[in-house]
Each structure stands twice: as structure tokens, then as C-alpha cells.
Image (cartoon, rainbow, N blue to C red):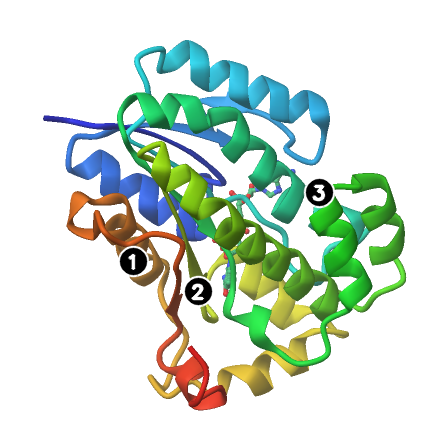
């Protein structure tokens, strides 16, 4: 039977690849994005987040088989506060807001984190403020941070939030997991690679991918499809690294 999913960030990149795969197999996908979507919403704002949740509730009153908050902004984006707003706060607000719809169909939620989350030197104060849920304080602090640290912090906090919530979600029949993509060729990556401040570090990081090159968006979408599928029905609370072996290379004794 065909399924119904909701996702954010389906206009380009990884989200667009996921949307295409789901639609090609006949599933219905409700896409929220700031452009080119079923529901146009700016997820950096409270108004946009509410509009997204209400729009999805209207279109899927009987529940969702899955939800994928994929919208995100890279380390080059200014002001940096947008990184926390979109990558962390909008993701967790929409997951919480849509959990009951996913529970109706005993579905799955897949957050989109990053393999940058394990890099040393993350700002602990930033992580603590994000975990406390104080959006205003987080947005003030992140303005003083460099972009890589800001981005990795927003994705680390998202992964930790996912791990903390997953058992209680599972007890209600909702599987909550995350993917941790490595470098993937998308419009976001292209913008960072072209950036004078952040491009070189990205190029250096890409040199160490054991696979030999960056992922294509469909490689990440395939991993998300697995986490949405009943084939992964006993998988809960995991960070699935999809990074061509980079995490194993950098952290061989940690998993
Ligand atoms: P992308 O820029 O192609 O896609 C991001 C999507 O988010 C776009 O469709 C964009 O319109 C949407 N978006 C941005 N700001 C928004 C806002 N305020 N409101 C609503 N929608 C908004 O980038 P991508 O690389 O496909 O990124 C997808 C996800 O994967 C992001 O969460 C990103 O952080 C994560 N990720 C990407 C990589 C990579 O190397 N590309 C690596 C790790 C994680």
C-alpha cells in the first residue's frame, strides 16, 4: 500500500533526492521548504514552523508513515543565528509537533545530522544552551562563533536530542533515528566550497574520505529510506554515519 510522508528541505540536494525516490515508488510526500514546495514556509521563524505543522496536519489528517526534517543551512550562512534556528530549533519543533501524526501510523522519523558532529573543539556552552531550549540565548552566542563550529554544534545538539528522546518515542511506537551524512555534492556544499573563508577547510576534509570522493545526494537518501522502512523496525536512536568511511577513519575506537 502506498505511504504518506512529510519532509522539510525537499527543494534541492539530499531532500530533493529523497522526495524523488519516494514519489517514484508511488508514495505521497508533503514537502515544506522556503521555495518550490507544497507548503512554503520559512522555518527560521515561529510563524513558518506553525504554518508547516498546520499545513501537514491538514494534508495528512489520518497520520504519517514518516517525517524527515531535512532543511538545513551550511557554515557559510550569515547571520549564524539562522543556522541554530533552521538546523536545530525548527527540526526539533517540527518533530515534536508532528509526533502524534506519526504515532497514528506507527511510523518513523529520521533527523538529518552530520558527520561534522564528532570533530573536536565544539563549544560546550553552545551545546548546553541548545539543550536548554533557549533559542534567543543560543542565537546570541552563535554570532560569536566561527561557521564550522556553529554548524557542527547545531547538528551535534540535534543528534543528542534525538538520542535522548528516542526511547520514549519508541515506547509510543515511533522510531526516531538520524543520519550523519559526510560531504555530499549539493547546492549547500557548492556554496561552502566557493566561500573564501570556509572553502579550504572543506576541500581538505574531503581529501580524507576513504571512498575517494564526496557522496551524491541519492546515497544519503537511500540510507534515509532504510531508516523509514520496516526493514529497520528494530533500529532506534542510532546515528547512521553515511560518510564513505570517514568516521571509522577518524574515530576507529569509538562507535
Ligand atoms: P541544500 O541547500 O541543497 O538543501 C537544503 C534545503 O533546505 C533547501 O531545499 C533549502 O531551500 C531548505 N531551507 C534552507 N533554509 C530554509 C528555511 N529557512 N526554511 C525552509 N527551508 C529552508 O543542502 P543539502 O546539502 O541537501 O542539505 C540537506 C541536509 O543535509 C541539511 O540539513 C544539511 O545540513 C545536511 N547535511 C548536508 C551535508 C552535505 O555535505 N551536503 C553533510 C551533512 C549534513
Q: Pick whichever, 145 or 218, lies toward us.
A: 145
For residue 146, side relative to residue 203 (left or right): right
Residue 34 location (% of width, % of height) = 59, 32
For residue 119, side relative to residue 168 (left or right): right
Spatial separation of the CA atoms under disc 3 and disc 1? 25 Å
In primary-sequence order, the first of circles 2 and 1 is 2
For residue 178, side relative to residue 24 (left or right): right
Where is residue 26, by image quadrant? top left
* Residue bearing the label numbered 2: 181
| Residue plotted at (64% across, 33% down) | 43
70 up-or-down from 163: above or below: above
* Residue bearing the label numbered 3: 85
Q: Secondary structure at mark 1?
A: helix
255 up-or-down from 134: above or below: below
* Residue bearing the label numbered 1: 223
Where is residue 103, by image quadrant? top left
Q: Secondary structure at mark 2?
A: strand
Amino acid at each position: 500500500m502506498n505511504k504518506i510522508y512529510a519532509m522539510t528541505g525537499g527543494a534541492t540536494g539530499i531532500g530533493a533526492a529523497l522526495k524523488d525516490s519516494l514519489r517514484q515508488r508511488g508514495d505521497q510526500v508533503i514537502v515544506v521548504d522556503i521555495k518550490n514546495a507544497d507548503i512554503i514556509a520559512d522555518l527560521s521563524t515561529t510563524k513558518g514552523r506553525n504554518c508547516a505543522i498546520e499545513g501537514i496536519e491538514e494534508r495528512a489528517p489520518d497520520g504519517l508513515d514518516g517525517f524527515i526534517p531535512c532543511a538545513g543551512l551550511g557554515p557559510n550562512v550569515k547571520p549564524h543565528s539562522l543556522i541554530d534556528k533552521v538546523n536545530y530549533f525548527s527540526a526539533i519543533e517540527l518533530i515534536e509537533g508532528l509526533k502524534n501524526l506519526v504515532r497514528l501510523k506507527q511510523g518513523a522519523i529520521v533527523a538529518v545530522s552530520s558527520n561534522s558532529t564528532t570533530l573536536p573543539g565544539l563549544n560546550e556552552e553552545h551545546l548546553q544552551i541548545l539543550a536548554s531550549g533557549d533559542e534567543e540565548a543560543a542565537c546570541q552566542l552563535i554570532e560569536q562563533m566561527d561557521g564550522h563550529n556553529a554548524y557542527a554544534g547545531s547538528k551535534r545538539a540535534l543528534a543528542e536530542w534525538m538520542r535522548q528522546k528516542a526511547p520514549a518515542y519508541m515506547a509510543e511506537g515511533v522510531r526516531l533515528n538520524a543520519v550523519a551524512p559526510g560531504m555530499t555534492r549539493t547546492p549547500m556544499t557548492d556554496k561552502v566550497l566557493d566561500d573564501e573563508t570556509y572553502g579550504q577547510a572543506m576541500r581538505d576534509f574531503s581529501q580524507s574520505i576513504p571512498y575517494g570522493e564526496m557522496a551524491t545526494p541519492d546515497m544519503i537518501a537511500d540510507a534515509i529510506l532504510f531508516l523509514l522502512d520496516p526493514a529497520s523496525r528494530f533500529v532506534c536512536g542510532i546515528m547512521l554515519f553515511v560518510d564513505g568511511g570517514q568516521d571509522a577513519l577518524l574515530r576507529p575506537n569509538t562507535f
